[in-house]
C-alpha cells in the first residue's frame, strides 16, 4: 500500500481562509507534575462529538490550562462520547467548527493546523468510490459572500506512527502523565508500516496529530474525480 501526506496546494490560486474554532475543548495542562510543562494542542479534533450531555459544560468552552487532575477529570467525562479509536490529549477539540470563512475554496481544503474540509458534493463522490473511513461533519462557518460552499469537516482518527529511523537518536519518550512529545516533527517523514491501519484510507498520525495521511486509493479517487485544493506528498513506509 502507498501512503501520502495531505497538504495545502498553494499553486491553485484559491483564496479560501477560515478563522474558526471548535465549539468545545479540553483544557491544556498547567505545570504537569511529571514533565513540568504547560501545554495543549488543538490539532486532535472530533467534530462528531456532542458534549451537551456533559455536566459543567461551560468548563469545556475555555481551553486555558488547568492542573492535570482537573484535565484528567474532564477526560473521563468526555471519554464515553468518543468514536471508537479516538484518543485524547490536552487541548483536544469537539463539536462543530464555528467562525468565519471567506474566499474561494477548492473541493478539499487544509491549512497549517491539519484541519481537513471537503465540499459536500465532493464527499459524496468520494464515498461512492468505496473509500474507507470518510466521515464528514457539519460546520457552522459564516460566509460574507454569495454562493458560499457547504464545507464539512472530515473527522480523522489518530492511527499510525513515524518510524524510529526518522526520529532523533535516542528520542525521549512521551511524558507518562500528560503524554507530551518533546521532539519536533522531522523534516523527512518515514511511516512505521507496522502501525498503519488496514481499514482506513484517511487518518492522522497518532504521534503527530497535525499530519494527515491517506492511501494511494484516496489519491487515485481524487484524481479521477478532479478534486483540487490539496497536494499529496508520497511517504515511505518502512517495517
Image (cartoon, rainbow, N blue to C red):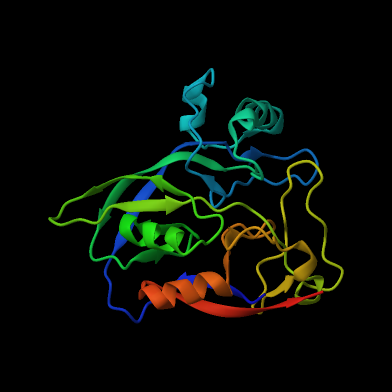
Residue extending farthest top: 55
- Residue at 43% in and 60% down: 128
- The residue furthest left is 146
Q: Compared to 30, does 136 lie above or below?
A: below
User: Which of the 4 image quarters holds residue 204?
Assistant: bottom right
169 versus 82 height, above or below: below
> Relative to the observer, which residue lies in front, 222 or 112?
222
Q: Residue at x 76, y 69 (%)?
A: 192
At 52% from the left and 42% from the top, the residue drawn is 93
Could you say which is closer to the camera, residue 210 or residue 154?
154
Q: Residue furthest right?
A: 170
Identify whether 51 is placed above or below 48: above
Residue 150 on image: x %, y %: 28, 52
Quadrant in the picture for residue 117: bottom left
Instruction: Estimate the x, y position of residue 200 in percent, counting from the top left.
Output: 61, 59
Q: Residue at x 36, y 72 (%)?
A: 227
In-image side of 17 versus 38 (left or right): left
> Residue 127 vs residue 205: left or right?
left
Identify whether 107 is placed above or below 40: below
User: In which quadrant of the rendered view does residue 106 lie?
Assistant: bottom left
- The quarter of the rendered structure image containing the C terminus is bottom right
Q: Position of residue 101 (x, y in %)?
A: 27, 54
Q: Position of residue 112 (x, y in %)?
A: 47, 64
The count of marks equals: 0
Q: Quadrant of the N terminus?
A: bottom right
Amino acid at each position: 500500500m502507498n501512503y501520502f501526506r495531505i497538504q495545502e496546494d498553494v499553486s491553485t490560486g484559491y483564496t479560501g481562509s477560515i478563522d474558526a474554532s471548535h465549539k468545545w475543548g479540553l483544557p491544556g495542562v498547567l505545570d504537569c507534575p511529571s514533565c513540568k510543562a504547560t501545554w495543549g494542542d488543538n490539532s486532535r479534533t472530533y467534530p462528531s462529538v456532542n458534549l451537551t450531555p456533559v455536566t459543567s459544560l461551560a468548563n469545556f468552552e475555555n481551553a486555558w490550562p488547568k492542573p492535570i487532575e482537573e484535565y484528567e477529570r474532564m477526560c473521563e467525562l468526555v471519554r464515553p462520547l468518543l468514536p471508537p479509536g479516538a484518543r485524547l490529549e490536552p487541548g483536544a477539540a469537539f463539536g462543530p467548527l464555528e467562525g468565519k470563512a471567506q474566499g474561494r475554496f477548492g473541493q478539499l481544503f487544509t491549512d497549517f493546523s491539519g484541519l481537513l474540509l471537503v465540499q459536500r458534493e465532493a464527499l459524496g463522490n468520494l464515498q461512492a468510490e468505496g473509500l474507507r473511513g470518510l466521515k464528514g461533519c457539519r460546520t457552522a462557518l459564516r460566509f460574507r459572500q454569495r454562493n458560499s460552499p457547504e464545507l464539512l469537516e472530515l473527522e480523522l482518527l489518530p492511527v499510525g506512527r513515524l518510524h524510529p529511523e526518522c526520529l532523533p537518536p535516542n528520542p525521549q519518550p512521551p511524558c507518562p502523565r500528560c503524554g507530551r512529545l518533546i521532539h519536533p516533527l522531522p523534516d523527512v517523514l518515514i511511516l512505521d508500516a507496522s502501525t498503519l491501519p488496514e481499514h482506513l484510507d484517511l487518518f492522522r498520525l497518532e504521534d503527530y496529530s497535525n499530519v494527515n495521511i491517506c492511501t494511494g486509493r484516496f489519491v487515485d479517487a481524487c484524481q479521477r474525480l478532479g478534486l483540487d485544493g490539496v497536494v499529496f506528498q508520497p511517504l515511505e513506509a518502512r517495517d
